[in-house]
Image (cartoon, helix red, strand yellow):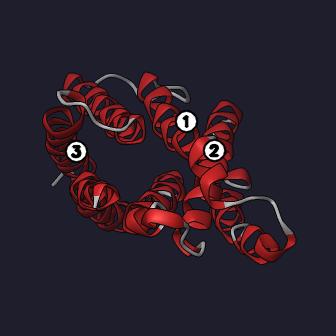
Amino acid sequence: MDLELISKLCVFACSLFGFCFGAVVFLAKKSPLYSKMITGAVGCMMLGSLLAVVRRFAGFEERAFQIDQLAIIGVFLFFFTANVGIMDGLADDRSKRFAKYRVMALIAPVVIALLYVPVLFSNAPVLSKVIYGVIALVAAASSYFNFKHAVFPDVDFGVIACVRGYNWLAFGYAVLYAGTVAARVFELDVICFILSLLICCDVVLILPLLKRGIEKWRI
């Protein structure tokens, strides 16, 4: 049984569902840019997993650099840009009273870094370590804001509280993806498969939960 192929197919199917949901609910309607950017992130997940499935079916040789890795970078860049600007400004006025939450949010990039350390000291090709390092860097940056907005106290109109669920799932995706990278490098196929199934659950829930939260903005 090819666990890697099965896991890639599952992730593709779930991300395809997620993107189609987002396209119908957000992209095809007048929705906040925030929701459209998250839909773009799920679209990158879908394209990346599709490329991985095609490569596996076609029997292409595994290389240190694969195009689908660019799609994963796109996922985290969408997550990052959705939160880093206006959204973060609505929550954090940079005053001392919120300093503890800014410090607490550092937990997220530390977790991503710790998951990357085994990859750094593995026998993987140098190019692979560099590419996964770049992915870890953008994942750490995006997860900082996802974690921060998940634990931050609410502001007027419930803007932050309403998307806490989404932010926890986005942070969870970063952790799970980093875990699959480490498991794949050390050829821990069963662990990689389990983590991929958890990613499937995450991806299926992320946009419906975001929709529920955004709808409350209008109340």
Determine the CA span between mark 1 and mark 2.
10 Å
Determine the CA span between mark 3 and mark 1.
26 Å
Q: Nearer the viewer, mark 1 or mark 2?
A: 2
Tags 1 and 2 touching, CB below 8 Å: no
Amino acid type, label 1: Leu
Query: How far across and down, in percent of the image, does residue 18 sit?
Result: 20, 45
Give me the residue at 61% from left, 54% from top: 90
Q: Quadrant of the N terminus?
A: bottom left
First in sequence: mark 3 vs mark 1: 3
- Element assignment for label 1: helix
Q: Is residue 82 above or below residue 95?
A: above
Determine the CA span between mark 2 and mark 3.
35 Å
Using the rendered view, name the quadrant where residue 208 is placed. Answer: bottom left
Amino acid type, label 3: Leu
Residue 77: assigned label: 1
Q: Nearer the viewer, mark 3 or mark 1?
A: 1
Give me the residue at 34% from left, 34% from top: 36
First in sequence: mark 2 vs mark 3: 3
Residue 84: assigned label: 2
Using the rendered view, name the quadrant where residue 81 is placed. Answer: top right
Give me the residue at 46% from left, 53% from top: 184
Tags 2 and 3 touching, CB below 8 Å: no
Q: Nearer the viewer, residue 176 or 209?
A: 209
Q: Residue furthest right?
A: 96
Q: Is residue 6 above or below residue 67?
A: below
- Element assignment for label 2: helix
How packed mark 2 is, by other alpha carbons closer than 10 Å (few <14, some 14-19, many 20 or more), is some
